[in-house]
Amino acid sequence: MTPPPTVVCDTANLPLKKPGRLTLSTDNPAFGPWFGGDSKTQYPNEPEGGSPWTQSDFSKEPYSGEGFEGALAYAVAADMGFSADKVDWLANTVFEQAFAPGDKPFDFHMAQIAITAKRAKSVTFSESYLDSNQALLAMSANPITSATSIADLKSYKLGAAANTTAFDFLEGTIAPTTEPLNFPDNTAARTALTNGVVDGIIVDLVTAFFMRDAQIDNFDTPEPEGKIVGQFGPPATPDQVGFVLQKDNPLVDCVNSALAQLKSDGTYQAILDRWINTGEEIPFLQ
């Protein structure tokens, strides 16, 4: 049985967006394994009439409390002293808006946003809640799947979502001889891949698993259509992913304390094992 949460800070005098309530945020649409549930289902504590999250076969629902980020968000909230019925969610439709300069409508936002020095000039990040390598996803029939090194990728047409560390890695480290393509988001990048516009796309490893297994593979055939060609390790460093808060928001101390408590008592590892750790070995491209 999971032990009851330990309240790690007093939020009574903190600058919450709504007194007595915690306002969280993530991207719309939301995808697994980061979030779970079904956007078409009405969950307890979800606003009457449904939330604004896109209703599609792949879109998930933050109010479900499922998925890695969804479950972690509610666990952090509980350790901060907020029960599930005191948590509200805001939908973010433009990825980079979450870490753009200016006031934020949320207390904290989570959507696999890597902590970078440039972004930290505009927002405050929590401690990292996940280290994630970049990976190369391709279609099984494409010759790029035989690549075993970064050098092998140079001649292929590659793409990634704009304004992401994945695109920065593609452009700066892989540095293909053909101009890399950037897309508005990972959904557009995946569509370009399946339509043959690019030979491969760069996404974080966890997203690569989800795209391959839930969004690309044809389950009516014995062989998968998508393939994770490899992940990128040393000398490339993994992204450290953090909660995003308004610049200089003192609430970050409570978020960090809650996260530390969850890591200490085993709750974090249980969430990680349930939603992220697959056990599948993916080769490194160096």
Image: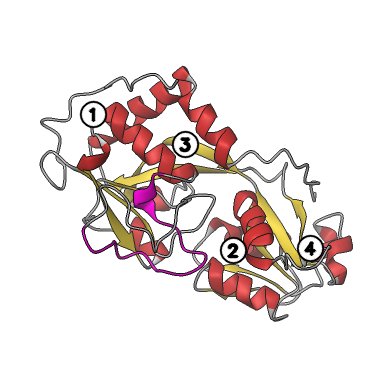
Residue 40 position within the rendered picture, expressed as x and y whole percent measured from the top left: 39, 64
Q: Would you call the spot at circle 1 few (<14 residues within 10 Å), some (14-19), or many (20 or more)?
A: many
Q: Would you call the spot at circle 4 few (<14 residues within 10 Å), some (14-19), or many (20 or more)?
A: some
In this rendering, is residue 225 above or below 126? below
Label 2: element kind:
helix
Residue 37 position within the rendered picture, expressed as x and y whole percent measured from the top left: 45, 52
Of residue 58 and residue 153, the one placed in the foreground of this image is: 58
Name which residue lies at 27% across and 46% down.
247
> As shown in the figure, which amino acid type bears the numbered disc 4?
Pro
* Labelled disc at residue 224: 4
The mark that comes first in sequence, 1 or 4, is: 1
* Labelled disc at residue 81: 1
The mark that comes first in sequence, 1 or 2, is: 1
In screen coordinates, is 118 left or right of 239?
A: left
Q: Which residue is mark 2?
A: 167
In the rendered image, is residue 100 in sight? no
In this rendering, is residue 93 above or below 270? below
- In this picture, which residue range is highlighted in magenta? 48-65
Name which residue lies at 87% across and 70% down.
143
> As shown in the figure, which amino acid type bears the numbered disc 3?
Ser
Q: Which residue is mark 3?
A: 128
Q: Would you call the spot at circle 3 few (<14 residues within 10 Å), some (14-19), or many (20 or more)?
A: some
> As shown in the figure, which amino acid type bears the numbered disc 2?
Phe
Q: CA distance from mark 3 to mark 1?
A: 21 Å
Is label 3 in contact with label 4 (beta carbons under 8 Å)?
Answer: no
Q: CA distance from mark 4 to mark 2?
A: 26 Å
Name which residue lies at 83% across and 72% down.
142
Label 4: element kind:
loop
